[in-house]
Amino acid sequence: MFTGLITAVGVVREVSTTAAGRELVVAAPYERVVTGESIACNGACLTVREQGPGWFRVAAVVTTLDRTTIGAWAVGTALNLERALAVGDRLGGHIVQGHVDGVGTVGQLERRGDALLIDIALDQNVGSALDELLVPLGSIAVDGVSLTVHALPRPGVLQLSIIEHTVRHTTLGALGLGDRVQLEADMIAKHLKRLAAPLLTN
């Protein structure tokens, strides 16, 4: 479990394909990383296979590649990183599982005063399912960053308002038109939708 508060930005150092899947070595400033721990990489929860001073190795299987942008990560790709939440830590963002629901595409960027407004178009294969889980001022994780849904300008599009701190301390400030981002809807919203489904169909 994570909070969506990014604690470091890492960089992909190596990429390979092995029996474990698409393996990535990520350079990161973390200390005392242990084999088997979970680290959210751009919001995708991945398990550490190996580690050393200033780096760790993870792998993504085909089902993970199907619903994330990991297949496009290359040497030099910057990643938002967060280690799993420890009991007693502050929950400063929102509850994030690291289970990516789908991918969206940056369709518009606009500076408005001290905020950066970003419109993200949801991929068609997840659009309607994700759309139903979004509410203005609700929570969403975008490339692992806990954010507030600023607005829903039209079906299949969500708008974010990014503050200056987030621009400086995550990869979101470097987004450009057409860039792809990983999305995870609010976990509570997903459970409520599932529980309410039988009542809404009767």
Image (cartoon, rainbow, N blue to C red):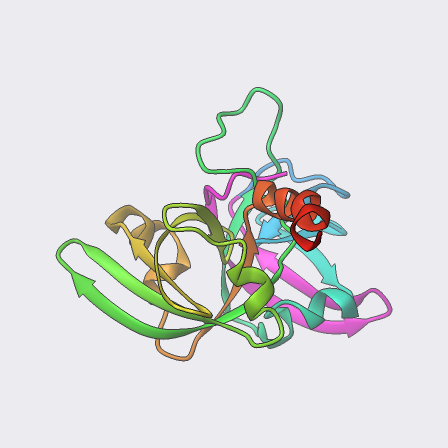
- Whether residue 52 is visible to the viewer of this picture, yes or no, is no
Residue 128 in the figure: left or right of residue 138: right
Judged from this view, the residue extending furthest toward the top is 88
**Residue 120 sits above or below residue 90 on the image:** below
Judged from this view, the residue extending furthest toward the front is 202
**Which residue appears at 66% of the width and 45% of the height?**
196
- x, y percent for residue 160: 34, 58
- Whether residue 3 is visible to the viewer of this picture, yes or no, is yes
- x, y percent for residue 103: 55, 68
**Which residue appears at 63% of the width and 35% of the height?**
32
Judged from this view, the residue extending furthest toward the right is 19
**Which residue appears at 24% of the width and 50% of the height?**
164
**Which residue appears at 73% of the width and 49% of the height?**
198
Count of labels in the image: 0
Residue 152 in the figure: left or right of residue 4: left
- x, y percent for residue 94: 50, 38
Q: Is residue 16 magenta?
A: yes
**Residue 115 sits above or below residue 195 on the image:** below
- x, y percent for residue 39: 63, 46
Image quarter of the N terminus: top right
Judged from this view, the residue extending furthest toward the bottom is 178
Judging depth in this view, the residue of 65 and 152 nearest the camera is 152
Main SS of residues in magenta:
strand
Q: Is residue 163 magenta?
A: no
From which residue to which does the magenta span run?
1-29
Residue 139 in the figure: left or right of residue 103: left
Judging depth in this view, the residue of 58 and 91 nearest the camera is 91
